[in-house]
């Protein structure tokens, strides 16, 4: 089919063709960037924490009115924690439990630095600390790839402002690789900050995500450490693994048991008892919301653009009824007419997507500067181009089909 | 004449319902998406205290030094140490100043039988209340003397007053926080600034504060700081008392400075203070202080999540596409009526009159799209509430100004979109049209 007549005809309605082309270009540019944001967020949400999340939940408690400073106060709180833990572990629906400062994704990060020398000048990689005991690996379902678990006698009571300087440490594989890129971490000595007593690495777990998903901690999100310590403070979190299928029952039984031990404690109503699925949903709610919003924008954009193509194509068909009739009378088949309008649409769309691809990269470059987004991959643009060409052809098909049904007798009407 | 054009516009729009519907829907979608994202953006980026935000300042002191591993840039810490907080507030160089920290004590129930619960709050100094213009429904802030005497007093929110005292005047009565009694001296009147501008280093949106205690009293009671706590070095002493001597940043400070001269003088004083600390051997680095006013501080702390800006920009992009779409469809619609335009021109209508007629038609289209856009915005906001984090979603509200803005924007955008099609309509030459028909 000759392309020249189409171009000649298009020049007679330049404005309309340019507008549709521009609309397709803008649609491509926005949809590519929106899709890119969506997949980035979905990948982020899908990252495994490294723990076995099913059947896991937490109960946060607070106990006002107790002193926390001094050895006597600490001993009293530690006794309370042991009583709580005994009560929780005795419940039939509970498989295992331990007390801690925070959990992965729970949005309360304790961070520090691991140095390889005792002097204060050199500090090593950042890490996020989780307090735990010999039950932690089993409760979280962590996979120990090297070394051993804590022994009960290694676990010491730990108050909120106590120094994190344990004799032993279990670290994540990511942190081990950062500390010893070409060596075995087990048995090595590290120092938690300047002038700290030595800490020996006794175990390495496969993967353990830190507590926050916020941007500032992203660089060390997988560099985590488990400290052998029982968090004995006025507020604390119990991490609890329910027996398979008994999550709901355990989530009711544990607060009841804790209130029975001490009715004066507070378990916050809104976020005191949360399943790990709940913790995860809270952590990634903003990302999920953003993905959904961008998805909605894409759907609306594509719908509006498709509707625009249908509208303008229909108008052009209506405008050229007589010309179509003449072509039909001169021997053009229905197929020729259909192809003509589809080709016209393809021509405009291709022009639009070429401009749109450039705009997509320009918008992405600007977003990279303004909002620290990553570079847009070419694949998104290619996928967007294909999608818009298909969308354009599909939208033009109905008006084109109607055009092909215009009878040759139309040539005689005016 | 306007009534006639309005009539013509309505007739024309009714003549081709499919095309009209398409245009109205496109406008509604574009405006609806923009307004939905704008409502969230407006909520998170608004000035919480517009009448004096430029006079409120946050002093920052470099507690860690330039080589500290804790630092990713040369910015000083957001919060200050207890030592510096005391020095700043005792020096009393600003019109008002207050040190503050985040607390979350448990409160005993109003009626026996219920359980204690956790309340959010801040330990502040008396000047905090006049500085942030906190409104009182009952009573007043505690006094400077009560601050100095470490009095066991409290100011509570109207929300807590409703829950605890059924909204009655509770001044003079007691609440038990973490097992200790505090006498209520004032009840705030719906003081729920968004964001919680006085301490955005710790919290910005979400639960407002329910209790305020005197700073010195809270320190005496060893009320746990539930906000951030960052140390360059480990404290020498453990426990709460250790936090008072440690080089750790955990206390927020806000000051009110009424003029540029005051701010300059304050900056100099702050640098003088840290120079003095350096000479005394405490810091080994040159003064690296900041004194940002509240708008600059909220911007620096990125209180408005970047996501809300990206969403707004993407939605405005959508609006542009919808408007380009409308231009195309309007052009088609107006051009189809070349015959009608020709007749009107031949009968004596001027080009201006044709232009006014089609502009009225565009405005009617925009208004209809705007009405539908208001409905779309409402649907969009409901949907956002379901998917966005609660603390942010709760802020997006439909109000009179948003409603009128939606309508104005729809009409304005459509009239602008109609400029080119209208111009084309005025180019129609009467003779040509009459001849061809």
Image (cartoon, coloured by chain):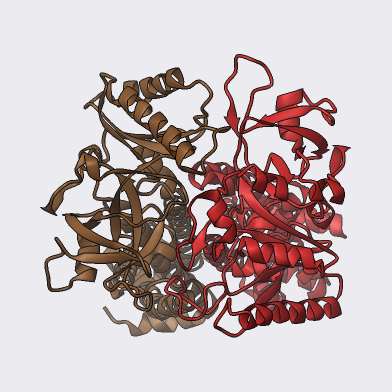
Chain colours: A brown, B red
Find residue B199 and report its image quarter: bottom right
Find residue A253 and report its image quarter: top left
- Quadrant containing the N terminus of chain B in the rendered view: bottom right
Q: Position of residue B229 (x, y in %)?
A: 52, 57
Q: Position of residue B85 (x, y in %)?
A: 68, 63
Nearest the viewer among B426 and A258 is A258
Q: How many numbered circles are shown?
A: 0
Nearest the viewer among A391 and A86 is A86
Q: Position of residue A215 (x, y in %)?
A: 44, 63
Nearest the viewer among A74 and B286 is A74
- Quadrant containing the C terminus of chain B in the rendered view: bottom right
Viewer can see residue A61: yes
Find residue A323 and report its image quarter: bottom left
Q: Position of residue B113 (x, y in %)?
A: 60, 14
Residue drawn at x 19%, y 60% as measured from the top left: A173
Nearest the viewer among A370 and B184 is B184
Q: Relative to B265, is B279 on the left or the right?
A: left
On screen, B305 above or below A256? below
Viewer can see residue A408: no
Residue drawn at x 48%, y 57% as measured from the top left: A297
Q: Relative to B46, is A125 on the left or the right?
A: left
Q: Relative to A184, is B368 on the left or the right?
A: right
Q: Relative to B318, is B377 on the left or the right?
A: right
């Amino acid at each position: 089919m000759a392309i020249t007549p189409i171009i000649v005809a298009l020049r007679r309605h330049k404005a309309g063709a340019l507008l549709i082309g521009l609309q397709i270009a803008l649609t491509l540019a926005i949809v590519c960037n929106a899709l890119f944001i969506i997949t980035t967020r979905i990948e982020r949400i899908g990252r495994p924490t490294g723990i076995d999340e099913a059947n896991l939940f937490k109960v946060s408690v607070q106990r006002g009115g107790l002193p926390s400073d001094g050895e006597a106060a600490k001993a009293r709180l530690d006794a309370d924690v042991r009583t709580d833990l005994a009560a929780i572990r005795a419940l039939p629906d509970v498989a295992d439990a331990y007390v801690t400062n925070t959990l992965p994704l729970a949005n309360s990060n304790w961070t520090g630095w691991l140095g390889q020398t005792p002097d204060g000048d050199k500090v090593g990689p950042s890490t996020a600390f989780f307090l735990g005991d010999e039950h932690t690996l089993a409760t979280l379902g962590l996979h120990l790839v090297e070394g051993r678990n804590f022994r009960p006698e290694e676990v010491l009571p730990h108050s909120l402002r106590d120094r994190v300087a344990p004799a032993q440490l279990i670290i994540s594989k990511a942190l081990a690789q950062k500390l010893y890129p070409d060596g075995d971490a087990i048995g090595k000595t590290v120092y938690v900050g300047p002038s700290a007593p030595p800490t020996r690495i006794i175990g390495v777990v496969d993967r353990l995500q830190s507590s926050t998903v916020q941007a500032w901690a992203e660089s060390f999100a997988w560099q985590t450490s488990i400290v052998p310590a029982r968090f004995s403070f006025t507020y604390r979190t119990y991490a609890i693994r329910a027996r398979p299928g008994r999550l709901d029952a355990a989530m009711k039984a544990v607060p009841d048991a804790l209130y029975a031990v001490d009715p004066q404690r507070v378990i916050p109503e809104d976020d005191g008892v949360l399943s790990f699925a709940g913790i995860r949903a809270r952590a990634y709610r903003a990302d999920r919301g953003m993905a959904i919003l961008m998805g909605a924008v894409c759907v609306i954009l594509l719908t509006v653009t498709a509707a625009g193509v249908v509208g303008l194509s229909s108008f052009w068909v209506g405008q050229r009824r007589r010309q179509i009739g003449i072509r039909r009378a001169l021997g053009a088949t229905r197929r020729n007419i259909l192809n003509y309008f589809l080709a016209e649409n393809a021509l405009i769309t291709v022009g639009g997507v070429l401009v749109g691809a450039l705009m997509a990269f320009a918008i992405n470059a600007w977003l990279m500067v303004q909002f620290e987004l990553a570079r847009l991959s070419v694949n998104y643009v290619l996928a967007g181009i294909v999608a818009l060409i298909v969308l354009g052809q599909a939208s033009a098909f109905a008006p084109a089909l109607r055009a092909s049904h215009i009878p040759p007798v139309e040539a005689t009407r005016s | 004449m306007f009534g006639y054009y309005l009539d013509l516009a309505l007739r024309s729009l009714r003549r081709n319902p499919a095309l009209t519907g398409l245009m109205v829907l496109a406008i509604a979608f574009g405006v609806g998406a923009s307004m939905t994202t704008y409502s969230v953006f407006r909520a998170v980026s608004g000035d919480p205290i517009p009448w004096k935000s430029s006079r409120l300042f946050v002093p920052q002191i470099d507690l860690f030094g330039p080589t500290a591993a804790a630092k990713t840039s040369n910015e000083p810490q957001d919060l200050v140490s207890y030592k510096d907080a005391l020095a700043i507030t005792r020096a009393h160089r600003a019109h008002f100043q207050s040190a503050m920290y985040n607390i979350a004590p448990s409160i005993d129930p109003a009626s026996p039988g219920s359980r204690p619960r956790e309340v959010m709050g801040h330990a502040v100094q008396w000047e905090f209340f006049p500085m942030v213009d906190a409104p009182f429904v009952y009573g007043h802030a505690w006094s400077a003397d009560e601050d100095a005497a470490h009095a066991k007093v409290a100011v509570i929110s109207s929300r807590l007053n409703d829950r605890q005292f059924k909204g009655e005047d509770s001044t003079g009565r007691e609440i038990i926080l973490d097992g200790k009694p505090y006498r209520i001296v004032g009840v705030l009147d719906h003081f729920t600034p968004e964001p919680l501008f006085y301490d955005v280093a710790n919290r910005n949106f979400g639960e407002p504060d329910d209790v305020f205690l005197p700073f010195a009293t809270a320190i005496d009671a060893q009320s746990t700081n539930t906000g951030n706590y960052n140390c360059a070095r480990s404290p020498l002493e453990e426990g709460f008392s250790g936090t008072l001597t440690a080089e750790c940043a955990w206390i927020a400070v806000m000051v009110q400075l009424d003029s540029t001269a005051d701010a300059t003088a304050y900056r100099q004083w702050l640098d003088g203070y840290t120079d003095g600390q350096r000479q005394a051997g405490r810091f080994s680095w040159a003064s690296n202080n900041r004194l940002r006013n509240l708008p600059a501080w909220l911007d620096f702390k990125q209180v408005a999540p970047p996501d809300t800006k990206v969403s707004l920009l993407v939605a405005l992009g959508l609006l542009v596409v919808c408007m380009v779409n409308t231009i195309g469809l309007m052009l088609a619609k107006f051009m189809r009526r070349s015959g009608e335009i020709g007749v009107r021109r031949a009968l004596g209508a001027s080009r201006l009159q044709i232009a006014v007629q089609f502009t009225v038609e565009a405005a009617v289209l925009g208004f209809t799209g705007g009405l539908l856009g208001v409905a779309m915005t409402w649907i969009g906001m409901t949907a956002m509430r379901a998917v966005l984090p609660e603390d942010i979603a709760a802020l997006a509200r439909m109000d009179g100004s948003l409603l009128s803005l939606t309508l104005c924007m729809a009409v304005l955008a459509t009239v602008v979109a109609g400029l080119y099609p209208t111009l084309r309509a005025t180019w129609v030459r009467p003779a040509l049209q009459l001849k061809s028909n």
